[in-house]
Image: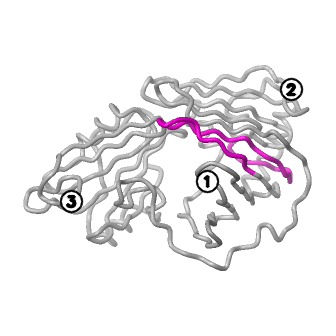
């Protein structure tokens, strides 16, 4: 609440002046909507197999709570619910609580973005009958992604949002096609009572996704629980720092994981147990490649076997940078 109260004046200043500092406008965009609203978005995700489109109903109370319901595409029927300090997902009438990740200060993230990216604020333009401010977040290095945002500074809503892969190809686009400032019923943000565990996303059936990561308070806690040191690569891309530490579950129990971020781009290092009999290929046995890589328009990933451990590294930066990180793991 302290962040939101402090940013109230910031929003007002941004709305009154297009000459506001880039950090201020970015912080306003990252803080989320400060007015209650109901709307509909057109969402496109560009995959290697084509463009996946869906329509999303979005409802927010302007106080950090938001409900998103997907219609069409691979996410048909999914509902995402964000409450204060909690996130939930519903599919087939079952609610699953998603991993809790501490929310960083919007201004802190904005300053990191300005330090690591070229941020350009363009003149206001009309959109949905409102005056929005386009913000470009361009990569300083060719291995990083980029982003475009169209911010309505009077409400804090990002009316249009685009992300781009390091090669400049569009990754995703979400655009409000309808937006009304109506206060939604409080019942829409009721905490779910039916829950199930999350199983994780990426990783060839191995549960390597960021949703398989249980966030911990610090590295010492992770090392105590898992009995293993945190992954510490000798090479980390410029501008990146540890953002989240935690543990993930594998077939041999829990192992440490660490997520790095530069304010926008990120990559996560998942450790798996020691190779078996000097092997430990991708499937975990004593055969298979010692290095396996895969790149899609959405992310890149590296599996690598070292003498002591096996690692899975996944992120939205270029595969060449992930490989440098993986090569310096012990």
Q: Magenta-highlighted stretch: main secondary structure?
A: strand
For mark 1, what is the residue?
75
Q: Say which element carries label 2.
A: strand
Residue at image location 74% in from the left, 21% down from the top: 122
Q: CA distance from mark 3 to mark 2?
A: 55 Å
Q: Are marks 1 and 2 in contact (CB under 8 Å)?
A: no
Q: CA distance from mark 3 to mark 1?
A: 31 Å
| Part of the protein shown in magenta | 30-56
Whether the magenta-drawn stretch holds residue 33 is answered as: yes
Answer above or below: position of 117 versus 272: above
Q: Residues within 10 Å of mark 2 (few under 14, many from 20)?
A: few
- Residue 191: give x, y in percent of width and height: 71, 73
Residue at image location 23% in from the left, 41% down from the top: 328
For mark 3, what is the residue?
284
The answer, for residue 115, to whether it is visible in the render is no
Residue at image location 91% in from the left, 32% down from the top: 129
For mark 2, what is the residue?
126
Residue 10, by quadrant, is top right
Q: Residue furthest bottom?
A: 193
Q: Say which element carries label 3.
A: loop
Work out whether residue 246 or residue 6 is closer to the camera in this orientation and state it: 246
Q: Give the mark nearer the N terminus: 3 vs 1.
A: 1
Judge depth for marks 3 and 2 and give the one in front. Answer: 3
Q: Residues within 10 Å of mark 3 (few under 14, many from 20)?
A: some
- Residue 100: give x, y in percent of width and height: 56, 63
């Amino acid at each position: 609440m302290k962040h939101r109260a402090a940013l109230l004046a910031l929003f007002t200043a941004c709305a009154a002046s297009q000459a506001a500092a880039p950090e201020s406008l970015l912080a306003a965009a990252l803080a989320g909507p400060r007015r209650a609203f109901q709307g509909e978005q057109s969402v496109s995700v560009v995959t290697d197999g084509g463009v996946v489109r869906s329509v999303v109903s979005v409802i927010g109370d302007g106080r950090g709570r938001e409900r998103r319901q997907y219609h069409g595409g691979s996410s048909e029927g999914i509902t995402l619910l964000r409450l204060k300090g909690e996130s939930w997902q519903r599919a087939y009438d079952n609610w699953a609580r998603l991993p809790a990740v501490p929310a960083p200060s919007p201004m802190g993230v904005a300053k990191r973005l300005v330090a690591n990216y070229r941020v350009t604020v363009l003149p206001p333009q009309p959109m949905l009958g409102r005056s929005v401010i386009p913000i470009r977040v361009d990569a300083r290095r060719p291995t990083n992604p980029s982003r475009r945002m169209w911010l309505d500074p009077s409400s804090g809503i990002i009316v249009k949002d685009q992300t781009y892969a390091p090669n400049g190809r569009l990754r995703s686009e979400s655009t409000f096609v309808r937006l009304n400032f109506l206060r939604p019923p409080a019942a829409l943000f009721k905490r779910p009572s039916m829950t199930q565990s999350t199983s994780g996303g990426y990783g060839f059936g191995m549960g390597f996704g960021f949703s398989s990561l249980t966030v911990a308070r610090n590295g010492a806690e992770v090392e105590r629980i898992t009995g293993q040191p945190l992954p510490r690569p000798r090479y980390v891309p410029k501008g990146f720092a540890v953002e989240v530490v935690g543990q993930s579950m594998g077939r041999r129990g829990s192992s440490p994981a660490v997520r790095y971020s530069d304010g926008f781009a990120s990559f996560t290092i998942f450790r798996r147990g020691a190779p078996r009999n000097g092997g430990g290929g991708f499937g975990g046995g004593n055969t298979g490649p010692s290095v396996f890589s895969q790149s899609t328009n959405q992310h890149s990933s590296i599996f690598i076997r070292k003498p002591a451990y096996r690692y899975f590294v996944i992120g939205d930066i270029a595969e060449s940078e992930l490989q440098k990180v993986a090569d310096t793991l012990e």
